[in-house]
Amino acid sequence: MAEPHPNPAAARLRTLLARPGLVMMPCCFDALSARLIEQAGFELTFLSGFAASASRIGAPDLGLMSYGEVRDQARNVLEGIAIPMMVDGDTGYGNAMNVMRTVEGFARAGCAGVMIEDQVAPKRCGHTQGKAVVDREEAYDRIRAAIEARGRADIVIKARTDARRTHGLAEAIRRAQTFAELGAEMIFVEEPLSEEEMRTICAEVPGAQVANMLEGGQTPILPPARLEALGFKVAAYPLAALSAAMRGMVATLEALREGRDHTPGLMDFADLRQRLGFDAYYEAETRYARKE
């Protein structure tokens, strides 16, 4: 078999997963949010489906975004950062053949990893109402297809199960165990309801376990040191950046509408320019102007 299409970002992600300690993964929704995550010193980000749907089409995460839209969003984000980024592949956007195309496409776009889940399409945010999962064999086939695609274009496979809510913890663990046996490197059991359930998942499921720290969701929000002690390898913060941005914008716009001073919550203009790269651009512009 030919060697898979190389992907340096996947190699960097595997290096992060192999070293000791918890990997913090704030999630982005566009190039700007990803750049701020990188500037804050984080070494990994994830293009959240929830946040990307809100940012790109102004709609809830209910399976409305297409594969092409998500891949385009991922490419835009990757152009603005140097750290590896994972991406939400939802259910793979169809059958096993679609899953393969999805996984290979994200790998060739430069994504470090892709998440494939076992929800019924169209999927829903893991902590909202109305979600359901496919049967075991269909769930396993999605991961088998993802692993096969990884053989053509290298990428880290993150397998997710949402079976905890509808089928109970034991079924979710069984699915997660099989995902790991099939070759998924990262495992995500969505919506454990207690710290004890989180401990059980880490004890019984192999692979790099992901904790989803969704503020206001069903899973307890624990400090990083506690997550690491339980056995988690990655802590994802899917909506922290989006929620903070939305709250700030709403407050500023309300102040403008009401005629109040809206400036206290704003970033200093000099800091804004520096973070966006104006200073670096001007420095390079001056350097090349001298040569000319």
Image (spheres, grey):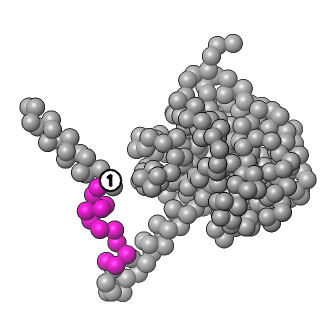
- Helix, strand or loop for disc 1: helix
Residue 70 in the image: state x and y as whole percent. 55, 45
* First to last magenta residue range: 263-274
Residue that numbered label 1 is attached to: 276
What residue sits 50% from the left and 51% below the top? 42
Prevailing secondary structure class for the magenta stretch in the rendered image: helix
Residue 62 placement, left or right of 166? left
Residue 163 placement, left or right of 116? right
What residue sits 85% from the left and 39% below the top? 178
Residue 290 in the image: state x and y as whole percent. 9, 36
Rendered-image quadrant of the C terminus = top left
Q: Would you say residue 272 sits in the magenta stretch?
A: yes
Give the quadrant of residue 199: bottom right
Disc 1 residue type? Leu
Give the quadrant of residue 59: bottom right
Residue 223 in the image: state x and y as whole percent. 65, 64
